[in-house]
Amino acid sequence: MELHLEVQAEMIIRKIKHYLITTMGVTLREATPEDFYKAFTLTLREEIMINWAATARTYYDRQVRTLYYLCMEYLPGRFMESNITNLRAVPLVRMVMRKMERSFEEELFFESDPGLGNGGLGRLASCFIDSLATQQYPCIAYGLRYQYGIFDQEIWGGVQVERPDPWLLHENPWELRRDIHAVSVYYAGKEVAQKNAKGEEVFDLADYEEVRALPYDIPILGYHEKGAFNVNTLRLWTTKESPKNFQLQRFNAGLLDQAGENTGLTDVLYPNDHHETGKRIRLKQEFLLSSASIQDIVANYMRAHHDMSLFADKVRIQLNDTHPVFAIAELVRVLMKDHDFSWGEACEVARTCCGYTNHTILQEALEEWNQNRLQSFLPRQYRIIERLNMDFCTQIRMQYPEDEERVRRMSIIEGGQVRMAHLAIYGSQKVNGVAALHTEILKKSLFKDFHSMYASKFTNVTNGVTQRRWILYCNPLLAEFITKRIGTKWIVDFLAIEDLKAFIEDETSLRELLQIKLENKKALNAFLRRQNPIRDARGKILYFTEPLDEEALLDVQIKRIHEYKRQLMNALHALMLYFEIKEDPDHPRPKRQILIAGKAAPGYEMAKHIIQFIFCVSRKINSDPSVNTKLRLLFLENYNVSKAELVIPAADLSEQISTAGMEASGTGNMKLAMNGALTVGTEDGANIEMHEQVTSAWWPFAFGSSAEEIRTWKENRSYNPWSIYSEDARVRRVIDIMKSGELAETPEEKRSLAAICQALLESNHTEGADRYFVLKDLLPFYQAQRKVDELYKEPLQWAKYCLYNIASMGKFSSDQSIHNYAKEVWNLSQVPVDPTCLDKVRNEYDEYDRCRIL
Ligand code: 26Q
C-alpha cells in the first residue's frame, strides 16, 4: 500500500510540474502558492473529468429520470477540501505535499470560500448535492454565479462593517465555462399574439430586453470506496461575460447605470435571509435563474429524446423555497409556445414535475411581488400566473361554494400582490417542510387552507448534513476514532453510526474522545489567538482574541444573527454568570468560554444592536481579572463555512435556543451533535427529532416554552415580560445594568442597549413587548446551563453523553434526507456510473496520459 502510494505520488508530482510549466510558465522553484494551488487543482481535475464524462454518458445512454435542483444560494465551502476527501486522496495529497516540501494547509487553502449564500438554506443545498452525487442520483443543480458573494464581516468597535467578498478575484480552476449552453432570457417588451399547433393562444415578444445567461459548471463528486464515483453538475449562471448584455445605446445617451444593469445582474447576492425586499434586481435575478434553467432542462431532455411525450416522466424540478418559483410559469409557457402543448397539458406537466420546499414560516420572509411590476417586467409569465390563478380560484369555489373569504385568503394574486408561496403550492406535486414540527405548522397554520384542499401534497422531509464534510473532512481525529471501532461504512451509510453505542462503557474510548476534543480546541484556540482580531472603531486591529485554555467548556452559538435565534438570550446569560462569579468567586464551577459568531443582514437594525451588545458584554467580562480566568465571551468575526469547520469539531456545547415554532429545522444543531457537542435546546425545528433519537436520558439540557404555549400566548396577547422583570432579581439586574449605561462606552453603544431594552419591555402599536420571549425563557435557560456545569465537572460522564449523542445522529445525514426525497417526492432511482463506460473513458484517456489517481 505504501509503495503504491509512493508511485502515485511521484506521478502526481510529475503532473503538477507539467502544469506549472505548460499553463503557468514557471518551474517548481519559482512557483508561488497560487501557481502551485492551480497546478495541483488541474492535476486532480483530470481524474474528476474522467468520471464526469462517464457519468454524463451513463445518464444519457440510460435516459434516466433526472432531478433538477433550483436554488438561489449555495455555500459549498472550499472545493479542494471536499474533492480530496471524496476522492479519498487525503493521504496521497499529504504525501505529495511532503515530498514537494510544500505546506498542505497554506497552499491548498489558497482558495477562498465561495460565499454564494446567506446561511442555512444555501448550506443545505450544498449538503444535498454532495449526497445526491454520493448516493448516485442523476441531478443537475442550478444557481447563480454571483461575482460578490455574502459580504465579509468586520467588527469595528462592536459595529458590523460589511466588505465586499471578491471571491472570483483569482481564476477559479474548479469551474468550466460552457459557452455552448448559453441561453437568452427576455424581460419586459410587448406581447404579440400567435397560435400554436393546437390552436391555442401563445405570445411572442417584441421590443424586449434580452439578457444572455452563460453557465459555468462545477463538478460535484460523490464519495466511493473504489473510485467508481459519480460526478454531478452544479451549473451557475452569469450575465457578466456576455458583451451583448451591455446596453451601448443607453451608455451613449448618458445613462451609465442603466447601460450596465444587465451585465451586473449576477454581481451581488442579496445578503438578507428571512426578509423579503421586493427589489427590482432581485426580481430579475430570480427570473434569470428560473428561465435559464428551464430552457436548459428542456434542451437537456431533448438531447436524449425524440419528442416531449416523456418529459413529465423524465424530469423532476425541485424549487428550493419560493425564490425560483417563476420556473413554474416559465415551464408552462415554453411547453405551449415551443412544443405545442395545450394549456391543460402544460399545466399538468408542470404540476407533475415540480416540488416546492418551504424553509421558513416567518411572515416577513414570505415573498410577494407587486402585480403591476411583474406585469411590465414579465408580461408573458404574468399572464400565465393570472390564468393559473383563475383556474385555481374556480377550483376553490367548486369545493367551497360561497366562501369568498377563503378564495381571498388562498388566491395567488391578492391586494395587488403576487404571493409566490401560493403559486408554488398550486403549481407543485409535493410541498414539504424541513422538520416534523415545521411541516405540522405548515399544515395546521401557515398553509392550513391549502392543506385542507390538497392534503396529499404535503409531506415532511427532515433536513440532514453530509457526514463527509462535517466529520470525515473537518474532524479527521474523530473520523479515525469511529472507523477504528466500526469500520468505514458510516461514510456512505450514516445509520451505521449507531454501532458506536457498543463503546459507551469503554473507558479507553471515552478518554480518547475527550482527548480528541482537547486537540480540536487547541487548533481553534491557535486560530483565535492569531487570526481573530479585536478592532477599534476605525477598523484598526488592536490585538487578537485571547481564549481560555482547552480545559474550559467551549459553549458555541454559530449562525446568522436573528432575533428569533436569540443570541440576545445567550449574551444575557453570560452577563448573569458574570455577576454570579463576581459575587461568589469561590463557588466551584467549570471554566466556560462562550463563542458567538454570525453575520447580521446589513439592513437589520436590531441584529446589529445585538452584535453591539455582545461586544459590550464581552469587553466587560474579558477585561475583568476577577472573572476572566473563569469565563470569557468571544465573538468570532466573519463566520463562514471554513470557520465552521474549525469551530464545530472543537465545541462542547451547542446553543440551539430559538423561540419554539420559529426555526424551521436548523442544521448546525446536527453538525455540532455529530461532532460530540451536547445541545442546550428548545423544543424547536429538528431539535425535537434529535431529542427523540437521542432519547431524554441522553438529552439533558432541553428547556423553554413549547411552540404550542407560545402560540397561545400570542393569540391571547397574554404574555407580559414586565412581570418576569419585576419578579426575578437576577433578570432585573441584567436589564438594569443595560439601562444604566454602565456597559456602554459610546453614544452608539448606549443607543443600541436602549433599543434592546425597549424591544424587551415596551410594546408599541404594532408589536408586543419581547416578541421572541427572551425574558420568558431566560430563567429556564439559566437552569439548563447549571445542569451543564454539573455534568461537565465529570469528564467521563460527559464523554458518555457525547458518544451517545454522536451515535444517535444516523437519521440526520443528508444521505437520509435525499433518500426520503427520492422516495416521497421525486420517485427517483440510483444510477451508478456505468463501469464499462468508465473503463472506456479511462482507456481513451490512458492512450495519451498515464497519470492516474488509483
Ligand atoms: C427572500 C427574498 C429576497 C431576498 C432574500 C430572501 C431570502 C433569502 C434567504 C429569504 C430567506 C432565505 C433563507 C432562509 C433560510 O436559510 N432558512 C433556513 O433554512 C434552513 C434549511 O432548511 C433551516 O434549517 C433553517 O431553520 C431556516 O431558517
Image (cartoon, rainbow, N blue to C red):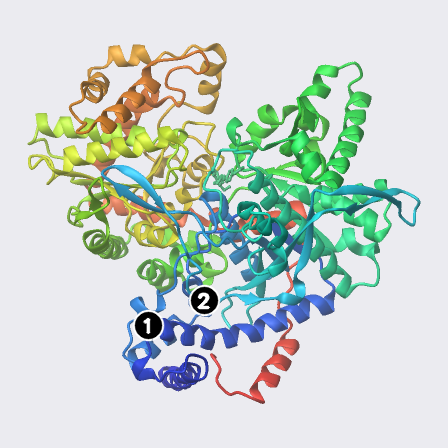
| Residue 114 appears left or right of 799 | right
To which quarter of the image does residue 366 belong? top right
Q: Nearer the viewer, residue 41 or 825?
A: 41
Label 2 vs label 1, nearer the camera: 2
For disc 2, the marked residue is 171
> In the image, is residue 242 above or below residue 734?
below
Q: Position of residue 368 (x, y in %)?
A: 60, 31
Q: Is residue 819 visible?
A: no
Which amino acid, by three-letter code, is at mark 1? Pro
Q: Nearer the viewer, residue 488 or 633?
A: 633
| Residue 331 appears left or right of 850 | right
Tags 2 and 1 in contact by the CB under 8 Å rule?
no
Residue drawn at x 53%, y 35% as measured from the top left: 436
Q: Going by the picture, which residue comes out furthest to the front?
A: 253
Secondary structure, mark 1, is: helix
For disc 1, the marked residue is 33
Q: Is residue 537 visible?
A: yes
